[in-house]
């Protein structure tokens, strides 16, 4: 019993010895330093249906020399679309991921979405990117038309 009282006394003494900072003590805070990567200029992306009619217009921030990088990413946004565009297949914008290899380029407008997703599959020629856009679903991909991506110079 004496040991228990002695243990309690030591515990309360230790707790009582810790002194909180004085209310008048000033604590200096500084905002965390942030390093922002330069934003790539917006390039025009136009999607056509299989008859050649425009079904959507977008802006896409294509990193400089994307064709020379195996993996890249950036932001994009949907500017306008026609009723023929599967608008439920994509958000009105966000982040995309891309892959380039051997003069070809693939861009996934909604990475992480398994169903109803727009994927661009194209080739790079004379500084322009063009190819096919595909509606990817859990069952597979269906070619829906073509696209042209005109990188800003």
Image (spheres, rainbow, N blue to C red):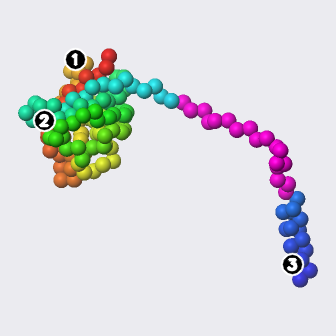
Instruction: Kindly identify which numbered label has been placed on residue 18.
Output: none
Mark 1–mark 2 CB contact (< 8 Å): no
Q: Nearer the viewer, mark 1 or mark 2?
A: 2
Residue at image mark 2: 49
Whole-percent x and y of residue 69? Answer: 35, 28
Whole-percent x and y of residue 6? Answer: 90, 74
Q: CA distance from mark 3 to mark 2?
A: 83 Å
Bin the neighbour count of mark 1 within 10 Å (Cα to Cα): few under 14, some 14-19, many 20 and up.
Answer: few
Whole-percent x and y of residue 143? Answer: 14, 40
For the C terminus, the quadrant is: top left
Residue at image mark 1: 126
Q: Nearer the viewer, residue 77 or 138?
A: 77
Residue at image mark 3: 4
- What segment is highlighted magenta in the picture? 18-35
Disc 2 secondary structure class:
strand
- Residue, x 19% and y 32% (percent of image)? 47
Instruction: Give the mark nearer the N terminus: 3 vs 1.
Output: 3
Dominant SS type (magenta): loop
- Taking the image as shown, residue 106 lies to the left or right of residue 94, namely left
Report which quarter residue 91 is drawn in. Answer: top left
Disc 1 secondary structure class:
loop
Bin the neighbour count of mark 2 within 10 Å (Cα to Cα): few under 14, some 14-19, many 20 and up.
Answer: some
């Amino acid at each position: 019993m004496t040991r228990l009282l002695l243990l309690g006394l030591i515990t309360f003494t230790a707790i009582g010895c810790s002194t909180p900072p004085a209310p008048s003590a000033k604590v200096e805070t500084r905002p965390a330093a942030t390093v922002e990567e330069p934003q790539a200029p917006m390039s025009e992306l136009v999607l056509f249906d299989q008859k050649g009619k425009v079904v959507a217009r977008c802006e896409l921030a294509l990193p400089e020399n994307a064709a020379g990088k195996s993996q890249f990413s950036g932001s994009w946004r949907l500017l306008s679309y026609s009723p023929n565009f599967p608008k439920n297949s994509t958000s009105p914008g966000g982040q995309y991921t891309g892959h380039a290899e051997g003069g070809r380029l693939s861009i996934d407008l909604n990475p992480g979405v398994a169903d109803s997703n727009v994927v661009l599959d194209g080739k790079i020629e004379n500084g322009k990117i063009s190819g096919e856009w595909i509606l990817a679903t859990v069952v597979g991909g269906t070619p829906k038309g073509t696209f042209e991506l005109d990188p800003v110079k």
